[in-house]
Image (cartoon, rainbow, N blue to C red):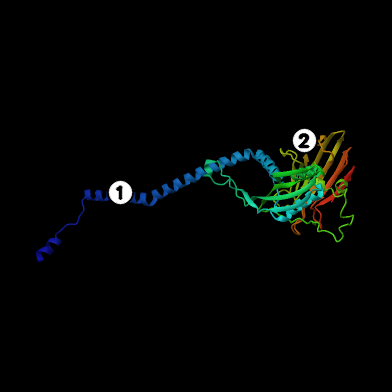
C-alpha cells in the first residue's frame, strides 16, 4: 500500500504544449458551436421572418401606390356603382308581409276598376342569398366577394278577376308598371261578347329584398268593408270608371319621373331622382342626408319637344350644360311620382325643400305617396306653372 501512494506522489500533472493547443482548439470549436446554436440560428430565423414580412409589406405598398394613382377613377366608379345600387334596390319592396300585397291589390281595384273576386297567397320563398358570389382572384382562395345578410324573396299571388275589356287592359298595364317589382307568370281569360266582360285568373310574382338595414313601415290604407245602405249612390255609380281621378293614384304606375325619399339610415340614399324605366341609370341622381336637402325640378318645352333638368344641392342632371336640359318623351300626361316613407323614429329628420317648375304646354301632375302623416319629408317651397299636386 505504501508503494502505491509513493507512486501517486511521484506522478507529474504537467500538460504539454501540444495538449494545450488541442484543448484550445476544442474550446474554440465548442464556443463556435454554442454561438451558432444560441445566437446565429435565432438571428437567421428572425432574418427570414423579417424578409417574409418585408415582402408582404412591399406587396401592400405596391397595391396602395397603385390605388393612390387611380384614386379618382375608383371614387368615380364607387359613385356610379352606388347610383346603380340605389336605383335597383329602390324597385324592390323591403318586406314580404301580406299588408303590402293587400295594398297592391287594393290599388289595382281602385285605379283600374277591375274586380278582384278572390286571392290566394303563397308562402314567401327565398330565391336568392346575397354574398354567395366567390372571388375569381387566385389570391382570395375562393372566398366570398362580400358579406351580407340580404335575401331575395318571391311571393306568388293568384287572383281571380272580372273586368270590362278596357279595365282588363289597364289592370295588365298597372301590374307590369307597378313601382315595386312584380311579374305576371301566367294568366287565363274568357271574354263574354254579350256584356263585354273579361274573367279569368292571374298568377303574379312579387319580389322583395329584406335584411340588413332595410327599414320597412307597413302601409296605412283602408279596405272597403261595405255599407249599411247598399242603394246609397255614393257607393254605387254606374259611371265610376269614367269619373275623373281625384286622387292621382294612376300616377303610381303611370309616371315620367320619380323622387324616392327614405331614412338616411336606410340601405339606399335618402333622396333619389330618376326617369321611369331607365335601364342605363344615366338619369339617376342621389344624395344622402339626415338633414334638409334642396331639390329643384324643371320641365320645359312645347309641341312635343320637352326637356327636363333637376338637381340635389350641387349635384345636377345633366352633369354638364345643365341649362340645356335633357330631352324626353312624356306619355299622354306629364306626371311625377314622389314616393316618400314614414319616419323611423325621432332621430330620422331627413327632408327635402322642393322647387318645381313647369314651363311646358302640358299640365304637370304630381303624386306624393306614403309620406309621414306627422312630419312630412316633402316641403314644396316653390311651385311655378300649371301643376296639380295629389296627396
Badges 1 and 2: C-beta atoms under 8 Å apart?
A: no
Q: Quadrant of residue 284?
A: top right
Q: Left or right: 152 with respect to 353? A: left
**One can see residue 312 in this view:** no
Q: Is residue 12 above or below residue 317?
A: below
Residue 148 x, y percent position in the rendering: 62, 50
The foreground one among 117 and 17 is: 117
Q: Secondary structure at mark 1?
A: helix
Q: Quadrant of the N terminus?
A: bottom left
Q: Left or right: 311 with respect to 141? A: right
Q: Quadrant of residue 10?
A: bottom left
Residue 244 x, y percent position in the rendering: 88, 46
Q: Residue extending furthest bottom?
A: 1
Dot 1 or dot 2, earlier in sequence? 1
Q: Which residue is mark 1?
A: 29
Q: Secondary structure at mark 2?
A: loop
Q: Which residue is mark 2?
A: 320
- Which is closer to the viewer, label 1 or label 2? 2
Q: Residue extending furthest front?
A: 194
Determine the residue positioned at 84% across, 35% down: 306
The foreground one among 254 and 230 is: 230
**One can see residue 12 in this view:** yes
Q: Is residue 204 above or below residue 361?
A: below
Dot 1 alpha-carbon crowd within 10 angstroms: few under 14, some 14 to 19, many 20 or more: few
Image mark count: 2
Determine the residue positioned at 71% across, 44% down: 187
The foreground one among 117 and 361 is: 117
Dot 2 alpha-carbon crowd within 10 angstroms: few under 14, some 14 to 19, many 20 or more: few
Q: Left or right: 93 with respect to 25? A: right
Q: Left or right: 151 with respect to 308? A: left
Residue 110 x, y percent position in the rendering: 81, 50
Q: CA distance from mark 1 to mark 2?
A: 82 Å
Amino acid at each position: 500500500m505504501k508503494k502505491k501512494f509513493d507512486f501517486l506522489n511521484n506522478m507529474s500533472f504537467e500538460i504539454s504544449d501540444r495538449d494545450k493547443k488541442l484543448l484550445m482548439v476544442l474550446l474554440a470549436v465548442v464556443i463556435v458551436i454554442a454561438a451558432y446554436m444560441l445566437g446565429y440560428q435565432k438571428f437567421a430565423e428572425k432574418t427570414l421572418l423579417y424578409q417574409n414580412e418585408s415582402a408582404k409589406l412591399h406587396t401592400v405598398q405596391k397595391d396602395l401606390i397603385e390605388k393612390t394613382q387611380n384614386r379618382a377613377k375608383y371614387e368615380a366608379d364607387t359613385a356610379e356603382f352606388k347610383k346603380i345600387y340605389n336605383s335597383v334596390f329602390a324597385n324592390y319592396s323591403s318586406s314580404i308581409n301580406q299588408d303590402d300585397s293587400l295594398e297592391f291589390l287594393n290599388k289595382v281595384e281602385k285605379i283600374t276598376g277591375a274586380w278582384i273576386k278572390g286571392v290566394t297567397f303563397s308562402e314567401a320563398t327565398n330565391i336568392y342569398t346575397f354574398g354567395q358570389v366567390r372571388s375569381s382572384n387566385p389570391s382570395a382562395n375562393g372566398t366570398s366577394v362580400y358579406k351580407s345578410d340580404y335575401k331575395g324573396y318571391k311571393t306568388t299571388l293568384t287572383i281571380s278577376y272580372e273586368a270590362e275589356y278596357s279595365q282588363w287592359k289597364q289592370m295588365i298595364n298597372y301590374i307590369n308598371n307597378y313601382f315595386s317589382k312584380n311579374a305576371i307568370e301566367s294568366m287565363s281569360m274568357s271574354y263574354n261578347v254579350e256584356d263585354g266582360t273579361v274573367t279569368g285568373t292571374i298568377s303574379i310574382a312579387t319580389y322583395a329584398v329584406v335584411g340588413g338595414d332595410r327599414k320597412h313601415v307597413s302601409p296605412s290604407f283602408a279596405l272597403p268593408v261595405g255599407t249599411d245602405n247598399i242603394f246609397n249612390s255614393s257607393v254605387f255609380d254606374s259611371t265610376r270608371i269614367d269619373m275623373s281621378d281625384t286622387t292621382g293614384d294612376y300616377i303610381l304606375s303611370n309616371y315620367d319621373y320619380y323622387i324616392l325619399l327614405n331614412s338616411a339610415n336606410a340601405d339606399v340614399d335618402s333622396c333619389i331622382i330618376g326617369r321611369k324605366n331607365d335601364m342605363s341609370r344615366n338619369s339617376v341622381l342621389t344624395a344622402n342626408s339626415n338633414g334638409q336637402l334642396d331639390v329643384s325640378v324643371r320641365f320645359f318645352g312645347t309641341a312635343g319637344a320637352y326637356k327636363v333638368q333637376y338637381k340635389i344641392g350641387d349635384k345636377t342632371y345633366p352633369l354638364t350644360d345643365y341649362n340645356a336640359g335633357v330631352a324626353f318623351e312624356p306619355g299622354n300626361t306629364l306626371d311625377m311620382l314622389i314616393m316618400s316613407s314614414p319616419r323611423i323614429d325621432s332621430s330620422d329628420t331627413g327632408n327635402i325643400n322642393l322647387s318645381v317648375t313647369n314651363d311646358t304646354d302640358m299640365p304637370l301632375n304630381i303624386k306624393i305617396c306614403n309620406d309621414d302623416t306627422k312630419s312630412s319629408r316633402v316641403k314644396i317651397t316653390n311651385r311655378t306653372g300649371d301643376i296639380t299636386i295629389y296627396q
